[in-house]
Image: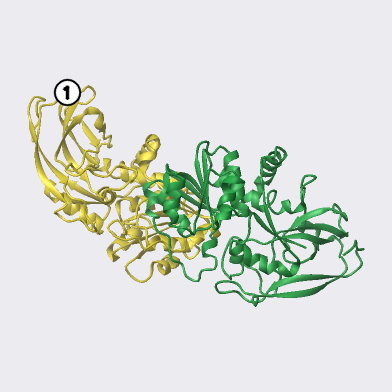
Chain colours: A green, B yellow
Amino acid sequence: MTEQTATETATSIQWHLVRRPVGEPTGEDIVRVEAELPPLANGEVRVRNEFLSVDPYMRGRMNDMRSYIPPFVLGEVMTGGAVGTVVASRAEGLSVGDVVVHDLGWRDVSQADAREFRPARVPDGLPSSLALSVLGVTGFTAWIGLKLVAGLREGDVVFVSGAAGAVGSMVGQLARLMGASRVVGSAGTAEKVGLLTERYGFDAGFDYTEGGIARSLRSAAPDGIDVYFDNVGGEHLEAALRSFNDGGRAALCGAISVYNATSDPGVKYLSNVITRGLTLSGFTIVNYWSHLPAFAADMRGWLADGLITWDETVVDGIDATFDAFTGVMNGANIGKMIVRL
Amino acid sequence: MTEQTATETATSIQWHLVRRPVGEPTGEDIVRVEAELPPLANGEVRVRNEFLSVDPYMRGRMNDMRSYIPPFVLGEVMTGGAVGTVVASRAEGLSVGDVVVHDLGWRDVSQADAREFRPARVPDGLPSSLALSVLGVTGFTAWIGLKLVAGLREGDVVFVSGAAGAVGSMVGQLARLMGASRVVGSAGTAEKVGLLTERYGFDAGFDYTEGGIARSLRSAAPDGIDVYFDNVGGEHLEAALRSFNDGGRAALCGAISVYNATSDPGVKYLSNVITRGLTLSGFTIVNYWSHLPAFAADMRGWLADGLITWDETVVDGIDATFDAFTGVMNGANIGKMIVRL
């Protein structure tokens, strides 16, 4: 697609949710739609997307249930983070060529009021996909969870589950930068476990598919843990509850292990919350937007100092979006799962 | 027993733990001992106890497990709150006739270093047993849980389980005094439920043995709850998790429903902690002693203004202590369960 004038129509390829999945989503739950976009109205911009974000939390939005963000609407597009370039504009403040971030989701061309878009502000020399990961929701989630939810303190021992994922690999690095004395993580393959210590600076990692999680965690953190950043839920949370030192704090961010579950097995060892004086706090970034500038300042500084390592698992093409999504649900990614258009 | 000189010996009737119970404690787990007390050493006092406290948390201490307070020692006395009068003293600062509180537990006469005892400071005209309840650990627990753990805010809807118990009946009244807009509670008999609204100022109560707890809670608090003070755990906690508004806070104080359990069924609906941004905080007063003066000032003020209603279930005699303890575990009490010597 080349630069367009605002008076032209355009075609947008989109993915719509047409059925709410029960258990694991299938290709019949979504449908590919070619939508005709009208000429721009006053105040609107048209954006050619370069990268789409696919994230585990989207599984929750496929259900018709109460949550911090409303469910996806049946018959409408799967919304979510994306970054692209303005190709036509009838809005002040956004010009053709600007790189912007938005939440309009799984489509190759997004057209909407300019207020739906914000400048990506990725430092020169870095890919714009970082607006979806390190400098975007992924990094922000890690930063909030450690700093504001778990209240990380100098010397804490930190455990993160799903540690080779987009959020997990950030949590490990940020925990260290914030003063943790020991950082341990779990991942689902030997290759990922290797990355934890060799690439992301973890002190120890373990494969949660090998042997019991509780036993593996005790080996990785023999003196117990003070902070747990939970991306997984279920047996991981139980293991953390058993390894917590007195006064331990859990930031509950995700529960990928149960997103596709059709029944709730319950979490054992909750009595330790009382006997050890623990705090479990669920959080989502929607309540923390006011902290975005402070996060961005921290992260730009760390990036400039070369202190942040990141990986992306890139899948090409709008038609591969659903496969990328099921992939991230099944742990096919190292670092951030990204669709490149 | 009359006033004694410090050089006399004395007899102390005590209850010792001799076996760690599995499931519900039985009379074979403890044994009655008559101990001979030597003459007072320098710095010691001898106290004739008037009231002993029996509390659900003591069940946890009968197990050999890690907790915020160490387990009871096999072959030694069941320790815990008591109030009595100094009958002999070889310590400065404590004189014969002083009424003191201590944690030396299930015995009729306590003798120890004076630093084990603190002045009861119960206002004139009120029974000294209040040093174990309203002005003691019971009231302090309610105050900390609402104010410092759950962070009660003006207008919050508050739910408390075990609401006719010693702590629960205080929680209901203090929640109202701290600005809650609606206070609801559960109890285990129709008589107790009646007390909630008729005597302790709750807006609504329900019998948790009748129908499902989740359904009853939705009826009692149709607009959801903001704060949950948990004395019970298990199904009550699950019901709270389902009724919480976004940003809800639970102060987890006790789990009497599972203290005697030999297996852990797990707690369902924990995923709501993430989707609703909830915080679950376990607490015990041992980490909050520095707030005792602030609590005492609040409570003395409320008592002086006639704003506090309390009940005691009194059992007479050191030999009835174990029955009183099993009674409080099984909900035989209204308000604080007290043994009067």
Q: Position of residue A12 (x, y in %)?
A: 80, 70
User: Badge 1 is on which residue?
Assistant: B90
- Closer-to-camera residue (B278/B100): B278
Image quadrant of residue B262?
Answer: bottom left
Image quadrant of residue B219?
Answer: bottom left
- For the point 41% across and 52% down, the residue is A215
Q: Is residue B158 visible?
A: no
Q: The disc labelled 1 sits on which kind of residue? A: Arg
Q: Position of residue B226 (x, y in %)?
A: 49, 56
In the picture provided, is B218 more to the left or to the right than A335? left
Tag 1 subunit: B
Residue B33 to residue A58: above or below: above
- Closer-to-camera residue (B30/B3): B30
Quadrant of the image containing the N terminus of chain A: bottom right
- Closer-to-camera residue (A313/B293): A313
- Closer-to-camera residue (B323/A201): A201
- For the point 34% across and 55% down, the residue is B255
Q: Is residue A277 visible?
A: yes
In the picture provided, is B65 more to the left or to the right than A257? left
Q: Residues within 10 Å of mark 1 (few under 14, many from 20)?
A: many
In the picture provided, is B46 more to the left or to the right than B263? left
Q: Position of residue B180 (x, y in %)?
A: 46, 52
Q: Judging from the image, what secondary structure is the residue with disc 1 in?
A: loop
